[in-house]
């Protein structure tokens, strides 16, 4: 396996293409990616996420299957681990690791973590050097308070380990009393460091997924990167009880949602700095040229964009909308030993990731393999029962968000644009996308294209029953609630 390439999938969670300067955004949010892409990487201008929420998209990226094929849309479902490209890589002798605080990849049993030997999950504790209760629970099980106490007291930092245990319990049961420094997400540098330390110990090829959550709610960029938000935007964000449903329910004006986009831009700038550090470290080791590096996002984010499918509805955060604010994502790829830059304008899909991995392992440069021969498809699943319960606290009429929506993206060779056909049981539309900054509806009809394409897609036998919320520990449920998933 000496000549096998390393595989590194970097998922910038919740980052939409339109807010990257790489894709024409007015704020200089991605200076590193701008230069990296211009010198030695391939940029896909029209990449689309397979789903509008984390679990559906990651299941598709890992498996190469459309959402309607794998059917994993909540914690109640579990993807057969053997269909994950990371499981296949591990079987073939790769060291595999996942590094993120996204619980869908590390804690919830939806089959995504099973392809990894090393799982580095939530580290949002006040003292990272002490024993981490989240990792302890993963290894020892729930309710082992005596075992945790003994482990904490015998650790190198007993005081800090005990403080982490207390903070985790308080975070689960009395979150409102915690300072923001404890409640905040773990920044990207923690996981970049963990990935670099782990990969540096490997003697053979390695494959990793690095999911970075800095641009997921809440947006809390360090002061160095908070160039467009500031204290007023932070104060406004901290007053939100719910980042999505207070707006959809009419409790808050939409300008407030748009205002915190300034913090989102700062968070993306912070992620860009970590990407620069990551690439530099791999290059210093001499590993970059033998690594397939894929930088993308599982979905985007909404800041009040009017829906082109549901009249009178706007897009807040992510989850159920078929809007390109959630689907049009960055995709920057550097193939092993790539020295030239390329920009690809055809529609691309993240479900092609396993195929690209396999072709690179065969020694090929699959130039446009993220662009399928047929259409690119996306499914935005409607609200399930737990999410309806959450949304119902703010909105009396949930009918706009319950139906599942689907979209088909195809290149229009006559003018170089992408034509998007989208539909749910109540409405349909055709949208023209020129680039990440410009899209507009041209019809309230999809010409039957969505049904035509999706009628040929069948659910495969790759899903089993997963967990219920009752099976999850309090800390995991709390983080999923914070992320808006339950």
Image (spheres, helix red, strand yellow):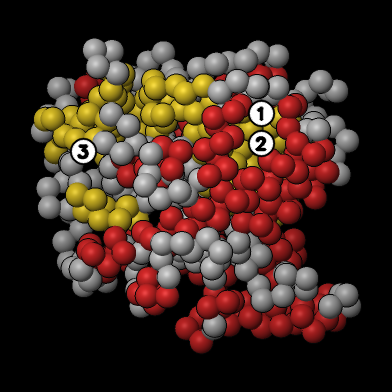
In this figure, which residue is indicated by the disc labeled 3? 424
Q: Is residue 119 visible?
A: no
Tell me: 285 left or right of 221. Answer: right
* Mark closer to the chain start, 1 or 2: 2
The label shown at residue 186 is: none
Q: Residue at x 70, y 78 (%)?
A: 164
Q: CA distance from mark 3 to mark 2?
A: 35 Å
- Asked if labels 2 and 1 touch by Cβ distance under 8 angstroms, the answer is yes
Q: Which numbered disc, 3 or 2, marks the residue closer to the eye?
A: 2
Q: CA distance from mark 1 to mark 3?
A: 37 Å
Q: Residue at x 56, y 52 (%)?
A: 271
Q: Position of residue 24 (x, y in %)?
A: 38, 39
Q: Position of residue 31 (x, y in %)?
A: 53, 44
In this figure, which residue is indicated by the disc labeled 2? 8
Camera-side residue: 426 or 412? 412
Local secondary structure at mark 3: strand
Q: Position of residue 476 (x, y in %)?
A: 56, 65
The label shown at residue 292 is: 1
Q: Is residue 206 above or below residue 26?
A: above
Q: Residue at x 78, y 71 (%)?
A: 129
- Disc 2: CA contacts within 10 A as few (<14), some (14-19) or many (>=20): many
Camera-side residue: 482 or 191? 191
- Disc 1: CA contacts within 10 A as few (<14), some (14-19) or many (>=20): many
Local secondary structure at mark 1: strand
Quadrant of the snapshot with the C terminus = bottom left
Q: Residue at x 86, y 44 (%)?
A: 201
């Amino acid at each position: 396996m000496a000549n096998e390439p390393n595989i590194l999938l970097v998922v910038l969670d919740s980052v939409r293409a339109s807010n990257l300067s790489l894709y024409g955004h007015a704020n200089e949010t991605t200076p590193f990616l701008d230069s990296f892409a211009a010198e030695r990487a391939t940029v896909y201008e029209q990449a689309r996420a397979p789903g509008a929420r984390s679990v559906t998209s990651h299941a598709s990226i890992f498996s190469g299957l459309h959402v309607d094929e794998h059917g994993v849309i909540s914690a109640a479902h579990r993807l057969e681990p053997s269909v994950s490209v990371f499981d296949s890589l591990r079987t073939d002798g790769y060291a595999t690791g996942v590094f993120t605080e996204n619980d869908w990849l590390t804690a919830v049993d939806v089959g995504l973590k099973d392809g990894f030997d090393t799982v580095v999950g939530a580290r949002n504790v006040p003292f990272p050097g002490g024993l981490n209760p989240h990792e302890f629970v993963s290894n020892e099980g729930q309710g082992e308070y005596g075992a945790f106490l003994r482990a904490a007291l015998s650790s190198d930092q007993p005081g800090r380990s005990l403080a982490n245990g207390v903070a985790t319990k308080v975070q689960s049961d009395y979150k409102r009393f915690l300072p923001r420094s404890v409640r905040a997400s773990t920044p990207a540098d923690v996981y970049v460091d963990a990935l670099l330390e782990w990969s540096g110990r490997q003697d053979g090829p390695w494959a990793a997924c690095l999911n970075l959550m800095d641009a997921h709610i809440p947006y809390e960029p360090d002061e160095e990167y908070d160039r467009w938000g500031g204290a007023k935007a932070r104060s406004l964000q901290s007053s939100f009880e719910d980042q999505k449903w207070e707006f959809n329910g009419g409790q808050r004006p939409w300008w407030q949602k748009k205002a915190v986009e300034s913090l989102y831009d700062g968070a993306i700038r912070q992620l860009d700095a970590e990407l620069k550090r990551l690439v530099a470290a791999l290059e210093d080791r001499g590993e970059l040229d033998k690594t397939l590096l894929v930088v993308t996002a599982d979905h985007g984010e909404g800041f009040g964009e009017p829906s082109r499918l549901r009249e009178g509805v706007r897009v807040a955060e992510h989850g159920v909308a078929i809007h390109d604010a959630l689907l049009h994502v960055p995709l920057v790829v550097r193939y092993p030993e790539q020295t030239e830059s390329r920009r690809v304008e055809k529609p691309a899909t993240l479900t092609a990731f396993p195929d690209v991995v396999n072709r690179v392992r065969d020694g090929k440069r699959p130039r446009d393999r993220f662009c399928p021969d047929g259409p690119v498809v996306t499914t935005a699943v409607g609200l399930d029962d737990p999410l309806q319960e959450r949304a119902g606290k703010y909105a009396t009429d949930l009918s706009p968000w319950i139906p599942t929506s689907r979209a088909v993206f195809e290149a229009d060779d006559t003018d170089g644009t992408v034509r998007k056909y989208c539909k749910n049981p109540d409405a349909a539309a055709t949208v023209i996308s020129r680039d990440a900054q410009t899209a507009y509806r041209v019809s309230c009809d999809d010409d039957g294209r969505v049904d035509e394409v999706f009628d040929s897609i069948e659910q495969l036998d790759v899903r089993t029953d997963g967990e219920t919320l009752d099976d999850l520990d309090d800390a995991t449920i709390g983080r999923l609630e914070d992320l808006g998933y339950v």
